[in-house]
Image (spheres, helix red, strand yellow):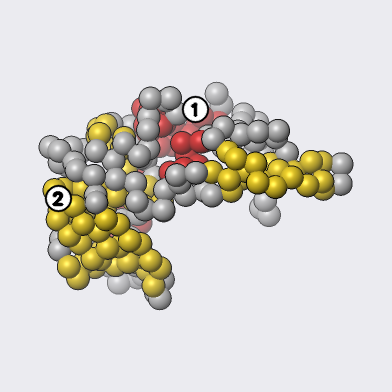
């Protein structure tokens, strides 16, 4: 979402030269440092000089910190179609979500969400809804994520191609942690590869890099 054709990636750093507001908001990016005069959706909060270059810091509003609770579902089965929709001007990340299969007939916007980081590390998610709701969490989905609810029932699922969704009904209080090891958990990485293959992710990335 943030690259341009022929961009090079180095071991120590990489430059991002194409800004995408929807992707930035979904990932919870709060501030952008750039030499551009302006960026879409950004409010200039700082301007300085670094050698011969002018640098500016722009602040983004209404970013995703786990409170995005979309209600309009788009069910797609391959990565190319997902990226096209994510880049569409009609896609509103607070309202729209991309799923890989139909999971609920109707979604209700959550009326309360609270997300904290606990030791482990792990995320603790507290949320409530008058019906069935889906929270879009700003970190990458993997089958190695383990959900441990202490209140209510919930389900983790991939959304928006690479993000983690938490589907729940009523009220939930749950921990989400990453588990990986030699005693059974390693199978989760194989499931991630199988999912990527099912979405034709490799061909999608090849097409993006050669576009």
Determine which residue is flagged by label 2: 130
Q: Earlier in the sequence, mark 2 or mark 1?
A: 2
Determine which residue is flagged by label 1: 207
Image coords of residue 163 (percent x, y): 37, 47
Q: Note whether 85 is above or below 45 in the view shown.
A: above
Image quarter in which the C terminus is found:
top right
Image coords of residue 184 (percent x, y): 27, 67
Q: Note whether 100 is above or below 110 in the view shown.
A: above
Image coords of residue 112 (percent x, y): 27, 55
Residue at the image point whose x is 40% and y is 68% from the top: 117
Q: In this view of the protein, which residue sits in the foreground, 111 or 170? A: 111
In the rendered image, the residue lying farthest to the right is 52
Q: In this view of the protein, which residue sits in the foreground, 152 or 122? A: 152
**Residue 102 shown left or right of residue 52 in the figure:** left
**Residue 19 shown left or right of residue 122 in the figure:** right
Image coords of residue 174 (percent x, y): 25, 66
Residue 193 seen in the current view: no
Image marks 2 and 1: residues in contact by CB distance under 8 Å:
no
Residue at the image point whose x is 70% and y is 33% from the top: 37
Q: Quadrant of residue 8?
A: top right
In the rendered image, the residue lying farthest to the bottom is 119
Q: In this view of the protein, which residue sits in the foreground, 144 or 181? A: 144
Residue at the image point whose x is 23% and y is 66% from the top: 173
């Amino acid at each position: 979402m943030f690259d341009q054709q022929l961009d090079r990636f180095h071991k120590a750093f990489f430059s991002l030269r194409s800004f995408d507001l929807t992707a930035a908001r979904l990932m919870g990016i709060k501030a952008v440092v750039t030499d551009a005069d302006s960026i879409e959706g950004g409010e200039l909060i700082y301007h300085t000089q670094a050698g011969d270059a002018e640098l500016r810091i722009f602040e983004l509003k209404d970013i995703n910190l786990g409170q995005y609770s979309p209600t309009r579902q788009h069910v797609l089965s391959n990565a190319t179609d997902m990226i096209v929709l994510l880049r569409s001007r009609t896609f509103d990340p607070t309202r729209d979500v991309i799923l890989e299969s139909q999971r609920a007939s109707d979604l209700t916007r959550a009326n309360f969400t609270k997300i904290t980081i606990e030791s482990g590390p792990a995320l603790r998610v507290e949320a409530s809804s008058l019906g069935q709701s889906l929270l879009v969490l700003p970190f990458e989905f993997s089958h190695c994520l383990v959900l441990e609810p202490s209140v209510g029932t919930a389900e983790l699922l991939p959304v928006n191609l690479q993000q983690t969704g938490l589907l729940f009904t009523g009220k939930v209080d749950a921990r989400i942690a990453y588990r990986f090891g030699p005693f059974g958990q390693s199978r989760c990485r194989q499931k991630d590869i199988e999912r990527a293959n099912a979405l034709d992710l490799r061909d999608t990335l090849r097409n993006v890099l050669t576009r």
